[in-house]
Image: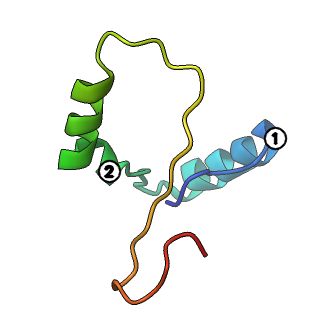
Amino acid sequence: MEKPVALCLDIAQRVLEKIEKKDLLTCVGYPLRYGGGTAVTRQLLAGQTIALVVGQYWSGSGREDPRE
């Protein structure tokens, strides 16, 4: 299942009801949480107070500008 499951709680509850009604096995993955970049970032930010984080995720082939 893609994140976010829904943009409001009411829709998320309806999705859950349908999943339970059909007895489906579902999950939401967070694969980047366990990547090397995450570990490095945690080390760099350890002990610091964070006020604002701006990030970008790029999964392109290397031929395009990730800021577009």
For residue 26, above or below residue 44: below
Distance in Å between CA atoms under marks 2 and 1: 28 Å
Extreme bottom residue here?
63
Q: Which mark is residue 32?
A: 2
Identity of the amino acid at label 2? Leu
Q: Which residue is label 1 attached to?
A: 10
Q: Residue at x 50, y 19 (%)?
A: 50
Q: Which mark is residue 25?
A: none
Dot placed on the residue nearer the N-terminal end, 2 or 1? 1
Image check: 24 left or right of 34?
right
What is the tally of numbered marks visible in this picture?
Answer: 2
Does the rendering let one see residue 35? no
Identify which residue, 22 or 39, lies in the foreground.
39
User: Residue 45's quadrant in the figure?
Assistant: top left
SS type, badge 2: helix
Identify which residue, 44 or 39, lies in the foreground.
44
Q: Residues within 10 Å of mark 2 (few under 14, many from 20)?
A: few
For residue 19, above or below residue 60: above
